[in-house]
Amino acid sequence: MKVLDTIHHLKMMMTRATRRFYKNVGIAPSIAPVKPDKNNKVTNGDNTVQSPISAGVDGTQSATGVNTSIKDSSKWTLRLNPNKDNDNNKEEWYSVTLDGRAIRTPLGLPFALPSPALALAVASEWDSQKLYLQPAQMPIMTLCCTAIDQVASDPTAHQTDIIRYLRNDTSCYWVDPTEDRVLNRQQAQAWEKLHKTVSSELLGLPDDLGPAQAVGGSDALLISRKSDGNKMSGLPHPPLLVEKAKKWIDSLDAWTLTALYSACAESKSFFIAAAMIFEATQHAKGECKVATRDPKWAVQAARVEEEFNIEMWGLVEGGHDYDRLNSSIQMHAASFVAQNVAASFHLDSS
């Protein structure tokens, strides 16, 4: 019976899936985002095609926590184009075309990107689609649509969730070295340096001020519960660290905030995500103090415990390998978006 139910479910999913309806994919010059009208519409010519990708996984626009309209159009443009009022702004934006028609987002907004590399990457995702469209195979398209449709109009939910990851950061929960010296050593190798990078270089904290850390299960339960000294559940990080983190998060444009949120969700860590996004944007601006690195290091930092367990107990095919691949895809996509957007905005403002 379960097998028949599964087959029926797969058939239903296939009937809802969108077939590839286009032959040629390209990119074209586009105008920068402009303020939507009172009906949340942005005019960008008639030669466009509505996105076949919906907000909901069931082919509808219904999904938990998803905006179906722009909540704050007054700041929508500025969050997408922070150089809008800069006198040197070159306004070089790009769209992705399907058979010569520019695509739109699930909310019907123009899909305008500030970087040609970003547009080419999204075009490549569309071009790689075969008989049916597979949104799960389009991570960069997903991030860009989220930035335009969701984060730019109201970033509050994403900003709040990122702070939640900070208060329950997986890289701040360490195994007791008396219980497992090997895992503790691997955690130290993966996390110590990035804690210092985020605390001192990104947030500008004194060298002796860093995140709270729990060592062992009992310590984690003790220090992360609510108390007079810890009004919120989670790790009692220094108030200055939390304040500086909030200030940095609030300063991010919609593209970078979306990339940061995606990396936090994948790594379950503010510090891992922030270190990766910070390094990517600093490289784009030519201000990074270290040599260019592949984001693979962030994937490894996010998977310390999982890889340790695989090493100890073996890999489950169809489970661990897919998790490893998905983690790599999501982290690389977030880094790619942040780096190319930073490079584009840096060139426009220089």
Image (cartoon, grey):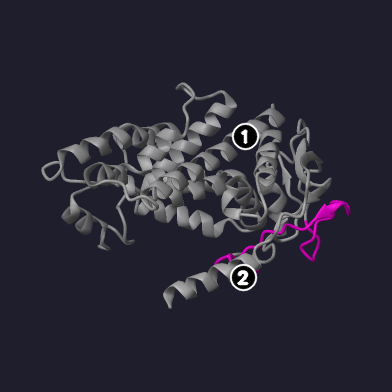
Q: Position of residue 250 (x, y in %)?
A: 54, 48
**Prevailing secondary structure of the magenta residues:** loop
Residue highlighted by disc 2: 62
Is 56 included in the stretch rendered in magenta? yes
Q: Secondary structure at mark 2?
A: loop
Is 350 included in the stretch rendered in magenta? no
Q: Secondary structure at mark 1?
A: helix
Disc 1 and disc 2: Cα gap in Å? 31 Å
- Which residue is at 28% across, 45% downward? 310
Give amino acid for label 2: Ser
- Which residue is at 51% across, 39% downward? 332
Which quadrant is the N terminus positioned in? bottom left
- First along the sequence among labels 1 and 2: 2
Q: Position of residue 339 (x, y in %)?
A: 58, 34
- Which residue is at 63% across, 63% downward? 55
Q: Nearer the viewer, residue 291 or 87?
A: 291
From where the camera sits, is residue 204 visible?
Answer: no
Q: Residue furthest right?
A: 46
Q: Position of residue 235 (x, y in %)?
A: 30, 53
Label 1, residues with CA under 10 Å away: few <14, some 14-19, many ≥20: many
Q: What stretch of residues is rendered in magenta?
A: 36-65
Give amino acid for label 1: Asn
Which quadrant is the C terminus positioned in? top right
Residue highlighted by disc 1: 340
